[in-house]
Amino acid sequence: MALDIEQFYRRYGPMVLRRCERLLRDPEKAADAMHDVFVEILRRRETLTDEAPSSLLLLTATNLCLNRLRSARRKPEDKDEELLMQIASAEDPAAPAAARSLLARIFRSEKASTGTIAVLHMLDGLTLEEVAAEVGMSVSGVRKRLRILKERAAELEDVS
């Protein structure tokens, strides 16, 4: 049975928008991303079911936003504006750059799904079991990825 996308949009749109705003930190980009989430669901509606729609939409939004952040990091739209915003919003101008550099080094050799796992568990507060169900992995696999991330972060922080 095909999904009723219009009903999903009315019911879950605000939730998806909040997720996109939280990850992208830009209301305009978040609104665009939210619409793209529903376009993606619309494309796949014949193969999807209406079981756990909020989970499906949150996972789709998370992946889409993380992909946009990765793309933006590779080719920023306006480097000068980004730098000005960092300087204006940071108490310690070096802190955001250092944090971004650390995160880039941590995730450089990780699979894209590891970023999704980290967001779902650390940002959204999902349990390991919930994260495993969302990403289609075992709980031990999720636990191992998170442990490796924490170890890598600790190692890199000690080096810095």
Image (tube, rainbow, N blue to C red):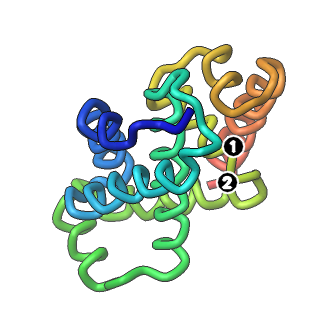
What residue is shown at x 58% (from left), y 50% (from top)? 44
Looking at the rendered structure, the secondary structure element under dot 2 is helix
What residue is shown at x 58% (from left), y 30% (from top)? 49
18 vs 150, nearest the viewer: 18
Residue type at mark 2: give it: Phe
Residue type at mark 1: give it: Thr
Cα separation, mark 1 vs mark 2, equals 8 Å
Residue 83, image x and y in percent?
A: 30, 76
How many residues crowd mark 2 within 10 Å: few (<14), some (14–19), many (20+)? some
Q: Quadrant of residue 96?
A: bottom left
Q: Is residue 67 left or right of residue 4?
A: right
Q: In which quarter of the image is residue 147?
A: top right
Callout 1 touching callout 2 (CB < 8 Å) = yes
Q: In this view, does 111 lie to the left or right of 51?
A: right
62 vs 42, nearest the viewer: 42
Per the image, the residue denoted by label 1 is: 114
Residue 69, image x and y in percent?
A: 47, 62
132 vs 121, nearest the viewer: 132
Compared with 100, 128 (above or below) is above
For the N terminus, give its image quadrant.
top right
Residue 56, image x and y in percent?
A: 52, 34
Q: Residue placed farthest to the left in the image?
A: 88
How many residues crowd mark 1 within 10 Å: few (<14), some (14–19), many (20+)? some
Q: Residue placed farthest to the front in the image?
A: 1
Compared with 81, 32 (above or below) is above
For residue 80, the mark is: none
Per the image, the residue denoted by label 2 is: 107
Looking at the rendered structure, the secondary structure element under dot 1 is helix
46 vs 151, nearest the viewer: 46
Residue 81 appears in the figure: yes
What residue is shown at x 68% (from left), y 22% (from top)? 133
